[in-house]
């Protein structure tokens, strides 16, 4: 499923999920948005998604709201600002690629852990 602004159509906000548990977007390709995905108090699981060519990739925990996205087999690339922004949130990343974003690949991390059995990368941030 491809979500993309029309050429010359101006900026759009990609997907916004708020107060959601169990959302599971799969196979989405989101581009040309001001923000690919905005998450507030949300525990979404993204599977085989591409977040590319946006201003910002995934914005988790906007204004310090606790979110915990899981990204499995996803790509976050070529965004003009940060690839993944965490603010008062955490994230779990599995088999992922974050590359060539204009700002930080991942912004707002204060804690990184690796789960030995699953090899998940678990990221944490402070509220902001």
Image (cartoon, grey):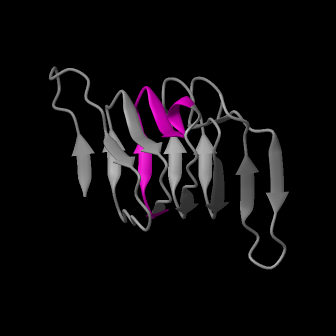
Q: Position of residue 38 (x, y in %)?
A: 42, 40
Q: Is residue 72 left or right of residue 31?
A: right
**Residue appearing at x 41%, y 52% in the figure:** 19
Whether the magenta-drawn stretch holds residue 59 is answered as yes
Residue 8 position (above or below residue 95)? above
**Residue appearing at x 56%, y 36% in the figure:** 83
Q: Position of residue 33 (x, y in %)?
A: 32, 31
Residue 103 position (above or below residue 114)? above
Q: Nearer the viewer, residue 75 or 115?
A: 115
Residue 128 position (above or below residue 15)? above
Residue 104 position (above or below residue 86)? above
Give the tally of numbered discs: 0
Residue 13, by quadrant, is top left
**Residue appearing at x 43%, y 51% in the figure:** 50
Whether the magenta-drawn stretch holds residue 17 is answered as no
The segment highlighted magenta reads 46-63
**Residue appearing at x 82%, y 46% in the figure:** 111
Quarter containing the C terminus: top right
Q: Nearer the viewer, residue 65 or 96?
A: 65
Residue 98, by quadrant, is top right
Q: Position of residue 96 (x, y in %)?
A: 61, 57
């Amino acid at each position: 499923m491809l979500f993309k602004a029309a050429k010359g159509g101006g900026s759009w906000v990609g997907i916004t999920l708020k107060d959601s548990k169990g959302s599971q977007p799969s196979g989405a390709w989101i581009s040309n948005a001001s923000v690919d995905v905005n998450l507030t108090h949300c525990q979404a699981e993204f599977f085989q998604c591409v977040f590319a060519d946006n201003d910002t990739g995934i914005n988790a925990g906007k204004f310090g709201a606790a979110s915990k996205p899981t990204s499995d087999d996803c790509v976050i690339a070529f965004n003009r600002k940060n690839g993944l922004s965490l603010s008062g949130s955490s994230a779990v990343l599995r088999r992922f690629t974050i590359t060539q974003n204009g700002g930080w690949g991942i912004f707002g991390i204060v804690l990184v852990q690796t789960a030995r059995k699953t090899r998940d990368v678990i990221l944490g941030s402070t509220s902001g």
